[in-house]
Image (cartoon, helix red, strand yellow):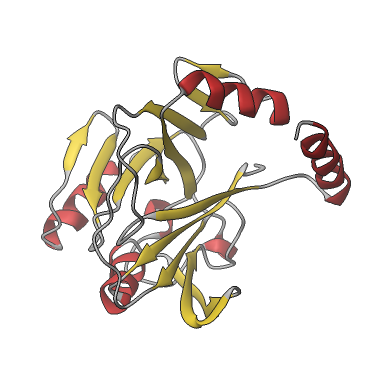
Amino acid sequence: MFAPLHHVSLLTRYAEENHFFYTTLLGLRFVKKTVNQENHKMLHYYYGDYAGTPGSVITFFVVAALANRYDNDHFLNSIGLKIPKGSLHFWEQRLTEAQTIFTKEQNTLYFQDRDQVTIRLVEVEQPSLAKALQVQNSIPGDKQILGLLSTEFHVADLEKTAEFFYRLLGWKTDQGYLQLNGTDFIQLVQTDTAEKTRMGRGSMDHVAFSIKDETALDHLYKKAKQQG
């Protein structure tokens, strides 16, 4: 299945705790350790399925002196992750054993990492990961995380944001949701303050979307220029 959400990238202060959380607890593979292309002194951690498949990847820029974040007038927030049907109970037990506080709503578990990033594990009607994409760890292959599901765009003007996505990408918004395929989505959330957002621990730096090929990318580039 084509994954419209390519990857999400965030900021972490806690390199060791971050590595433990996403590999040992969530069972993702530590795909690679590299650096920020714009700042070679800043480490960049990549997590995903075994092959680092687009649609499975979460990355973190490691900033040791990072201060608190302040989510106010506009910001990106939360990582929604898909898990196979019938695996929710397994993940409840796993989080409980790890003494990770979570809440449950229907087919979804909510909890946070060390940087207070909100994680959502959601059961979906999708097959388990292919053998070649499964990570060799303590999580059974039929219970492993399938990939990215969603994130949230918190914005001051819902209509202008929805219009932007429709004009440029043709994505329609329905009751605050940009539905990207049968499961994956972006939720648009209204903010209610004019106070400035300040990036910090757990802030989401960007969301990347997949596109079919270079021809489609070139078409989109020209369309963006025309739209200013």
Horizontal arrangement in the rendering, residue 100 relative to residue 195 (left or right) = left
Outermost residue, top side: 175
Location of the C terminus by quadrant is top right
Q: Quadrant of residue 167?
A: top right
Q: Answer whether residue 186 is visible to the viewer in this image.
A: yes
Q: Which residue is drawn at the image coordinates 29% and 73% (left, top)?
A: 20
x, y percent for residue 117 = 29, 53
x, y percent for residue 43 = 46, 79
Horizontal arrangement in the rendering, residue 32 relative to residue 170 (left or right) = left
- Residue 175 to residue 178: above or below: above
Q: Which residue is drawn at the image coordinates 36% and 56% (left, top)?
A: 199
- Residue 74 to residue 142: above or below: above
Q: Answer whether residue 144 is visible to the viewer in this image.
A: no
Location of the N terminus by quadrant is top right
Q: Quadrant of residue 172?
A: top right
- Residue 174 to residue 98: above or below: above
Counting every numbered tag in the picture gives 0
x, y percent for residue 222 = 85, 40
Closer to the camera, 215 or 164?
A: 164
Q: Which residue is drawn at the image coordinates 33% and 39% (left, top)?
A: 86
Q: Which residue is drawn at the image coordinates 59% and 73% (left, top)?
A: 38
Closer to the camera, 187 or 223?
A: 223
x, y percent for residue 68 = 24, 60
Closer to the camera, 178 or 50?
A: 178
- Residue 85 to residue 166: above or below: below
Horizontal arrangement in the rendering, residue 132 relative to residue 12 (left or right) = right
Outermost residue, bottom side: 41
Horizontal arrangement in the rendering, residue 93 relative to residue 141 (left or right) = left
